[in-house]
Image (cartoon, grey):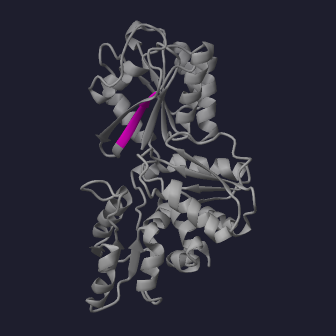
């Protein structure tokens, strides 16, 4: 869960964060505007599990640089699932922020900091008038009120983080055998598996299913050695075509990326978006968006493989732009299609926010796995395991 910390300058946002996590995460100073870029701190927060606290610049910053800082603060809201509004008094800034959180359905905890100095009446009255359920008095200097703040965060957290849906929920049953095809290529992290592979593997174990993990060059032998067919084969999307040729049609097949379209995003919307590939014309602009900012390799999926496959399939002169990390365009209206990565380093809110931006601009959006399946001619097969929820 991503927890954004917002407020005006010098209300003690960074001090509250440091006191809450019991570490010196953010620089604290009496100088207004000390926090310039968002500062992130990941930690285990029982019973919510892993959370990311994001300290932001003050929303009342000024000047050219101040406006840029405010813009970055506002972008954090797109990935915020719980907002902490730190204040020492009531003003139009607090009112506007709470109104924005309500508009975006983001639960909010109002933190009345510097409570040791008194004068919180107008803050409580203003927040209560906007139906804020959670208002907590704290003193970041005297370290009081933080037990109550932790309780308020847990109570305000969206239900899905107390009972979060899992990647494989509704797809497998206990004792099912699932084969995971995990190529080890130039893009594989050294000594590790990528996040979707790890999460799917763990979730299969949590569902009391059996997992067989193989590289693509060992898949045929592994299938031949099984007494019964697996309930499902899940592959890295880049190996889709090769794996589809090996796995018999009677065995369900999909990819980690398509599972993530369902787990992190909106599967139905992204399935619909993939079909727009067939309608692309000469000169159309395509945006390929990656959540992480990894160092591109020689055969990079977003910068090399997908553009190549798109042009081979469509036989069109396409204009392709790649963006990475948080550099997602505010205006998507000039694009004919957005192809997003699986979003394994994003939370669901941020990916859904990007999908909403695409929908508002009436631009189809899909993800790597669905796009690759479409380009490989195995689209219907790849989404068949989800036929009930897609009403196929």
Percent x, y for residue 220?
33, 85
Q: Quadrant of residue 95?
A: top right
Asked if residue 33 lies left or right of residue 97, the reply is left
Residue 184 percent location from the top left of the image = 32, 64
Q: Position of residue 352 (x, y in %)?
A: 57, 51
Res 268 visible:
no
Q: Is residue 294 above or below residue 243?
A: above
- Vertical comparison of 244 with 327: above or below: below
Residue lying at 71% horizontally and 54% vertically, measured from the top left: 363
The residue sitting at 44% across, 36% down in the picture is 3
Q: In the image, is residue 172 part of the stretch drawn in magenta?
A: no
* Residue 299 higher or lower than 250, as above or below: above
Image: magenta residue range: 51-55
Picture quarter with the C terminus: bottom right
Residue 201 position in % (x across, y down): 31, 66
How many marks can you see?
A: 0
């Amino acid at each position: 869960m991503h927890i954004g910390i917002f407020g005006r300058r010098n209300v003690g946002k960074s001090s509250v964060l440091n006191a809450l996590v019991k570490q010196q995460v953010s620089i604290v100073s009496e100088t207004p505007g000390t926090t310039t870029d968002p500062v992130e701190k990941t930690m285990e927060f029982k019973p919510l599990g892993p959370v990311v606290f994001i300290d932001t610049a003050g929303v009342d910053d000024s000047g050219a640089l101040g406006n840029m800082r405010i813009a970055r603060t506002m972008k954090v809201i797109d990935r915020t699932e719980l907002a902490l509004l730190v204040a020492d008094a009531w003003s139009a800034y607090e009112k506007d922020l709470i109104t924005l959180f309500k508009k975006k359905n983001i639960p909010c905890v109002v933190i009345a900091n510097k409570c040791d100095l008194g004068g919180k009446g107008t803050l409580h009255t203003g927040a209560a008038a906007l139906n804020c359920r959670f208002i907590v008095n704290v003193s970041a200097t005297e370290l009081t009120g933080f037990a109550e703040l932790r309780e308020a965060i847990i109570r305000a957290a969206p239900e899905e983080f107390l009972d979060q849906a899992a990647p494989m929920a509704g797809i497998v049953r206990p004792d099912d055998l699932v084969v995971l095809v995990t190529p080890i290529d130039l893009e594989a992290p050294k000594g590790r598996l990528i996040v979707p592979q790890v999460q799917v593997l763990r979730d299969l174990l949590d569902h009391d299913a059996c997992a067989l993990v193989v590289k693509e060059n060992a898949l045929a032998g592994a299938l031949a050695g099984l007494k019964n067919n697996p309930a499902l084969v899940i592959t890295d999307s880049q190996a889709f075509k090769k794996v589809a040729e090996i796995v018999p049609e009677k065995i369900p097949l999909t990819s980690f990326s398509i599972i993530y379209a369902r787990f992190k995003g909106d599967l139905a919307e992204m399935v619909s978006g993939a079909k727009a590939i067939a309608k692309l014309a000469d000169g159309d602009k395509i945006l390929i968006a990656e959540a992480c900012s990894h160092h591109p390799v020689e055969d990079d999926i977003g910068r090399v493989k997908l553009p190549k496959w798109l042009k081979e399939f469509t036989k069109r002169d396409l204009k392709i732009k790649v963006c990475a990390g948080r550099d997602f365009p505010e205006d998507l209206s000039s694009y004919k299609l957005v192809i997003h990565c699986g979003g394994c380093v994003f939370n669901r809110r941020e990916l859904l926010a990007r999908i909403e931006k695409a929908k508002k601009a009436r631009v189809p959006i899909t993800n790597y796995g669905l796009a690759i399946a479409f380009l490989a001619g195995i689209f219907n097969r790849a989404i068949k395991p989800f036929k009930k929820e897609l009403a196929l």
